[in-house]
Amino acid sequence: MLLIKTRRDVLLAPLQAVSGIVERRHTLPILSNVLLEKRGEVLTLLATDIEIQITTSTPDIGGEGEGAVTVGARKLQEILRSLPETAEVSLVLEDRRLQVKAGRSRFNLQTLPADDFPSMTLSQGEARNLRLTQREFRQLLAQTHYSMASQDVRYYLNGLLLLLADGELRAVATDGHRLAYASMPLAAAAGAAGDDGESRQELILPRKTVVELNRLLADSDEPLVIDILPNQIRFQFGQISLVSKLIDGRFPDYQRVIPLTLKDVIRLQRSVLLQSMVRAAILTNEKFRGVRLVLAEGSLKIIAANAEQEEAQEEIEVDYSGEPLDVGFNVSYLLDVLNNSVGETIDWGFNDASSSALLTIPGNDRFKYVVMPMRI
């Protein structure tokens, strides 16, 4: 049965959109597959790992038949990628095998029944809706996602906190060594929270969900609809629908981590500081990645050393006349914030060598980055 006939790019783009969540190895073999379902001229693709599900549809698909089948997502993607961009591709289903045809190329892939595919069911209950642009939410994620933990036993740190309160949407991520906070205002039409306590809502997005959203969202003013459901969240944008379970846990009180008072603040050119950090990082210890920031009158030195007794030193002129300061930081934590900030300058606020530092963007009170010092 001829299921699909279309250009290679028409099929590859939606496949790439959904297959990012597909694990290479899984206890359930069918979870390595993507569900292809054709109804009329509309092709729907669906992938899931039980925790997250991504669906997308493509109209104007040729082919005489209708039906559904699951096939290895990564194999199909690699085949399509290897074909010429202008290739016409046909997918023919015969005897539980999917034949991919393009020119003189033929590939026969194993399939599994579509009825066995474990699609997620949306939670029943009252939903809360937010409407904003893809760019706004993508920027919120970009400013915070790098501070998430990856495999922490405190499972609630392996994700990102979304908080709706006081007419704002706030995002917070921390791995216990640093914390990134960003917020954006929500118009009433977007589903902003009011001043009553019931409007306040906290939810924790899994790390994998955040990574996929960061990959799929466009830097555009195209609409994004967020539906907050009991224990689930759904993001709808373009032709894509992403449903994710939420992490069940209590996120730490981020407000206690952000310093309320600072002894001093110095302003630095972000690009100059970034380039100096990149160079100094070359000679850091690969395991600890520590650099010393030595601040004196009119000067900031960035010093790195390693076990081979090699040393790097960078010096930057700064407007500072206070007491000398010698403090150590993980250079990776500093590079993360410098690479993901967009301002030309950055403010470094501090109290002493044993206290957390606060990095902010001048004129922007909606972003804060807290980083703990380390002994070197």
Image (spheres, rainbow, N blue to C red):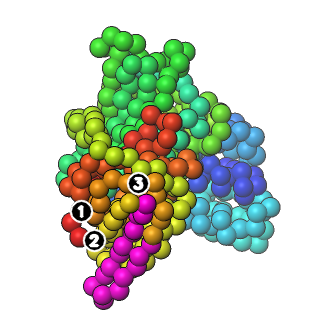
Specify which label sits upstream in the sequence, 1 or 2.
Answer: 2
Element type at mark 1: loop
The circle on residue 374 is: 1
Kind of residue at disc 1: Met
Nearest the eye: 137 or 47: 137
Kind of residue at disc 2: Phe
Quarter of the image that includes the C terminus? bottom left
The answer to whether residue 337 is left or right of residue 73 is: left
Using the numbered discs, state the Cα–Cα distance from disc 1 to disc 2 in whole angstroms.
Answer: 9 Å
Q: Position of residue 195 (x, y in %)?
A: 36, 12
Q: Position of residue 43 (x, y in %)?
A: 64, 42
Question: Residue at position x 65%, y 33% from top?
Answer: 222
- Toward which corner of the image does residue 52 lie, by quadrant? top left
Specify which label sits upstream in the sequence, 2 or 3.
Answer: 2
Kindly report which numbered mark, 2 or 3, lies closer to the viewer in this rendering: 3
Using the numbered discs, state the Cα–Cα distance from disc 3 to disc 1 in whole angstroms.
Answer: 23 Å
Label 2: which residue? Answer: 288
The answer to whether residue 92 of the structure is visible from this angle is yes
Element type at mark 3: loop
Element type at mark 2: loop
Using the numbered discs, state the Cα–Cα distance from disc 2 to disc 3 in whole angstroms.
Answer: 29 Å
The circle on residue 300 is: none
Kindly report which numbered mark, 3 or 1, lies closer to the viewer in this rendering: 3
Q: Which residues are magenta?
A: 298-314
Q: Position of residue 146 (x, y in %)?
A: 41, 52
Label 3: which residue? Answer: 320
